[in-house]
Image: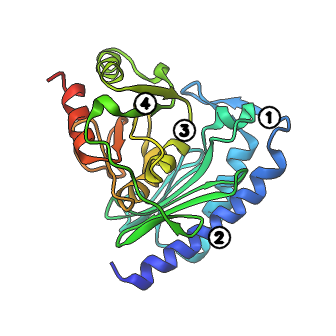
Amino acid sequence: MNTNTINNFIDLAQRMAHISGDIIRPSYRHPNTVGVKDDASPVTEIDRAVESALRAMIEAEYPDHGIIGEEYGSLCPDAEYVWVIDPIDGTKAFMAGIPVFGTLIAIAHRGVPIVGVMDQPISGERWIGADGVPTTLNGRPVRVRSCPDLAEALICTASPEYYEGDERGAFDRLIGAVKWAVYGGSCYVYGLLAAGSLDIGIEAGHESFDYCALVPIVQNAGGVITDWEGASLTIRSGTRFIAAGDPRAHAQALRLLAGE
């Protein structure tokens, strides 16, 4: 991928994150109108306002690009370049005033995420991952930490409630094999993983807008992020993913998830 092209995408994604923060911050810890979507998840007027603003910016600069967004669906999802947006990943945390939510902005080339931005507008933290350059947090390179043995790992997931049926059994096997587990954190978990603060992040019941931005962030910090079968994530991957700072811990986790 041409370096200038990547830099242009990063520039727009950064401007989008700035606009997102400007919309979110005045509404943080203030009452918001909350609706319930068909999947029983909550949505606020701020989720929708952010996504509307970001989609307008993309359409103005790259009218031939596709868009996948959590609140307003897909536009030309088979285009060569597709932007993937989650205006507020962690809407429940936003509603509760817990600053572990974030805006996720990704761009995929032929379905593969190549740029990811995660912005936490309350703490003022912004992770940027892009193919060919180190992941940064507020402009400074970050790196995952070593954890060769799953038995020494700190794991995090959004919530056990996302795991159903056989998924719950696989999740329980993994939780039983690690040293410590912590719950909650939404996308913020994966920024912390990229920065070397924890070892494993795992999710089920998620969509492409939940993970596409995380892929370049984790990978270009030296980590691994795949689906539960170990396949690379694309805009068409399923609803389950797992990330690890150390490939050895990741391989051990995949074996447990498979019941080996």
Residue drawn at x 35%, y 47% as measured from the top left: 245
For residue 205, which numbered disc appears in the image?
4
Q: Which residue is mark 1?
A: 33
Q: Quadrant of the C terminus?
A: top left
Residue 7 pos. (x, y %)? 48, 79
Q: Residues within 10 Å of mark 4 (few under 14, many from 20)?
A: some
Query: Comparing marks 1 and 2, which lies closer to the viewer?
Result: 2
Q: Residues within 10 Å of mark 3 (few under 14, many from 20)?
A: many
Q: Which residue is mark 2?
A: 15
For residue 186, which numbered disc appears in the image?
3
Residue drawn at x 33%, y 78% as measured from the top left: 1
Quadrant of the image occupied by residue 22:
bottom right
Disc 3 residue type? Answer: Ser
For the residues bearing labels 1 and 2, Cβ distance under 8 angstroms: no
Query: Comparing marks 3 and 2, which lies closer to the viewer?
Result: 3
Q: Is residue 119 above or below residue 185?
A: below
Q: How many marks?
A: 4
Residue drawn at x 29%, y 21% as measured from the top left: 170
Drawn side of residue 53 relative to residue 164, left or right: right
Drawn side of residue 199 relative to residue 13, left or right: left
